């Protein structure tokens, strides 16, 4: 069935969706009302058309600045550096962090042709130099080779700035994905973050 197969093939292009999952989704959509399918399609198109990236932190935003950067109640003393906008949502769900974010839009990966110049590292440096109240930068990367390479690169790059550099405590399993880490583990990772200068972890 050409129409069915095409629908399955298009859904399989989504991350994390295999052939079986795509088939289940198509069958589900066939069993709901046309209005529900149209509502889903409309919401996705609206997200595509109206969502962009924050001009300050490069997280997901509906305006020039995202809700977090626009919130005067957030602490400007801590800046959590993450790889992708998805991580911001997961860390926010933990309820542990009350500072601001900076999204690199990727990690350094020479094998994939991704170097520092492809990331928002220059913008990060600019924030540190202009937002004088930043006291701590927390690296929140997945514990993978790319995460380690990126963290070590930034550690050297930021060595001369008067900011404390820490990373999330590795109660996180090596190779794990922050987007799928449970709330309690993330809470502990923030509490047990490690000072990259070799000093005792922050309280």
Image (tube, grey):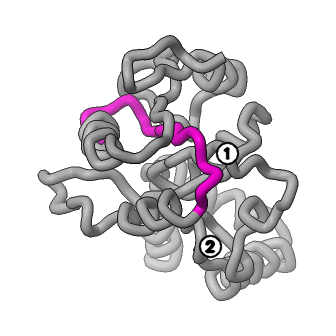
Q: Residues within 10 Å of mark 2 (few under 14, many from 20)?
A: many
**Does residue 134 belong to the magenta stretch?**
yes
Q: Nearer the viewer, residue 35 or 159?
A: 159
Query: Extreme bottom residue here?
Result: 49
Q: Left or right of 115: which side holds 97?
A: right
Helix, strand or loop at disc 2? loop
Asked if one can make out residue 27 in the rendered structure from this viewpoint, the answer is yes
Q: Quadrant of the C terminus?
A: top right
Nearest the viewer among 191 and 129 is: 129
Front residue (pair 14, 26): 14
Q: Is residue 97 left or right of residue 154?
A: right
Image point (81%, 77%), residue name: 39
Magenta range is 131-146
Q: Residue at x 49, y 34 (%)?
A: 164
Give above or below for 144 relative to 129: above
Q: CA distance from mark 2 to mark 1?
A: 19 Å
**Residue at the image point whose x is 83% and y is 61% from the top:** 71
Q: Secondary structure at mark 1?
A: loop
Q: Position of residue 151 (x, y in %)?
A: 34, 39
- Residue 52 appears in which quarter of the rendering? bottom right
Q: Is residue 183 magenta?
A: no
> Which quarter of the picture shows residue 38?
bottom right
Residue 167 x/y as whole percent:
47, 30
Task: Look at the picture and state if 83 lies above or below 167.
Answer: below
Q: Position of residue 198 (x, y in %)?
A: 38, 17
Q: Give the labeled residue for mark 2.
A: 54
Residue 77 - label? 1
Give whichever of discs 2 and 1 has the lower sequence position.
2
């Amino acid at each position: 069935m050409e129409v069915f197969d095409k629908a399955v093939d298009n859904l399989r292009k989504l991350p994390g969706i295999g052939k079986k999952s795509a088939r289940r989704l198509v069958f589900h959509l066939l069993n709901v009302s046309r209005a529900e399918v149209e509502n889903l399609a409309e919401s996705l198109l609206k997200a595509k058309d109206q969502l962009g990236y924050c001009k300050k932190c490069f997280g997901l935003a509906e305006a020039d600045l995202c809700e977090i950067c626009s919130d005067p109640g957030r602490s400007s003393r801590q800046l959590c550096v993450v790889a992708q906008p998805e991580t911001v949502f997961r860390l926010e769900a933990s309820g542990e962090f009350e500072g601001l974010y900076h999204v690199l839009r990727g990690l350094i990966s020479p094998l994939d042709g991704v170097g520092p110049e492809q990331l928002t590292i220059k913008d990060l440096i600019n924030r540190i130099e202009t937002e004088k109240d930043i006291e701590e930068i927390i690296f929140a990367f997945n514990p993978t080779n790319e995460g380690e390479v990126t963290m070590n690169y930034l550690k050297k790059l930021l060595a001369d700035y008067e900011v404390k550099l820490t990373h999330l405590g590795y109660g996180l399993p090596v190779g794990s994905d922050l987007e799928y880490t449970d709330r309690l583990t993330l809470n502990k990772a923030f509490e047990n973050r490690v000072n990259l200068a070799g000093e005792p972890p922050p309280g």
